[in-house]
Image: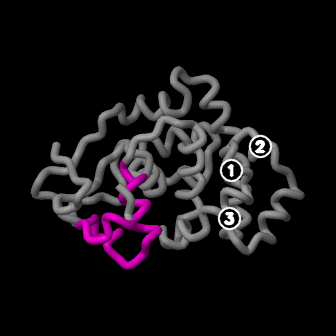
Amino acid sequence: MTSATAADLPRCFWAAEDDPAMARYHDEEWGVETRDAGELFERLVLECFQAGLSWSTILRKRDPFRRAFDGFDPAIVAGYGADDVARLMADAGIVRNRAKIEATIGNAGAFLALDATTVGGFAGYLDRFLPPPPARRPADATMTDLPGSTPTAKALSDDLRARSFRFVGPTIVYAFLQSVGRVDDHLPGCFRYRGP
């Protein structure tokens, strides 16, 4: 179902605004499980860059981010050097934050190492913390029931940090888990809500 044909469908509160990109992301991606390593790396990078900014800002810059970071191919990004950092810092299409850019390069190497040494790759690694299918919100859940993080997100954050990942605090990790369908936080009243 495309957002264009679903303009009047009820959505979660954050996607109800008049923003087609947000509606499309909500309708087609948010909360949908992906096991694809490239998609997982992209979502982790975007969540890291989102810290301190609105998600709509990141979505508007998603295509420039994809171009700037070679399609989020971690094997390419891990090999970036000083010239690439300078190129990215000069790219007005993305969020130009040196700490986040350098963290992304380091995270690409850490991601590759984890993906290569874990049964099932990075998705298999996530299974250790939150095996599918995701838990769903009860029928009486409201916006106030949605946490900013959870003990599981904190444990995953701690483990990622121990593996040299940066910009992976518990709040960023929880948003990442929502994004890649390891947490299903669609609320009752949303057309994508499925009860527990």
**Residue 60 picture quarter:** bottom right
Q: Which residue lies under the disc numbered 2?
A: 76
**Picture residue at 71% right of the left edge, 46% below the top:** 106
- The alpha-carbon separation of the residues under discs 3 and 2 comes to 16 Å
Quadrant containing the N terminus is bottom left
- Say the numbered circle drawn on residue 64: 3
Please tell me whether mark 2 sits on a helix, a strand or a loop.
Answer: helix
From the viewer's perspective, tell me whether residue 177 is left or right of residue 115: left
Quick one: which residue is furthest to the bottom in this view? 18
**Picture residue at 37% right of the left edge, 42% below the top:** 182
**Picture residue at 34% right of the left edge, 50% below the top:** 150
Please tell me whether mark 1 sits on a helix, a strand or a loop.
Answer: helix
Q: How many marks?
A: 3
- Say the numbered circle drawn on residue 71: 1
Q: Amino acid at mark 1?
A: Gly
Report x, y in % for residue 113: 66, 31
- Which of discs 3 and 2 lies nearer the camera? The answer is 3
Quadrant containing the C terminus is top left
**Residue 144 picture quarter:** bottom left
From the viewer's perspective, tell me whether residue 160 is left or right of residue 90: left
From the viewer's perspective, tell me whether residue 56 is left or right of residue 150: right
Q: Amino acid at mark 3?
A: Pro
Q: What span is in magenta?
A: 4-31
Report x, y in % for residue 64: 68, 64
Please tell me whether mark 3 sits on a helix, a strand or a loop.
Answer: helix
Q: Nearer the viewer, residue 191 or 5?
A: 5
Report x, y in % for residue 69: 72, 54
- The alpha-carbon separation of the residues under discs 3 and 1 comes to 10 Å
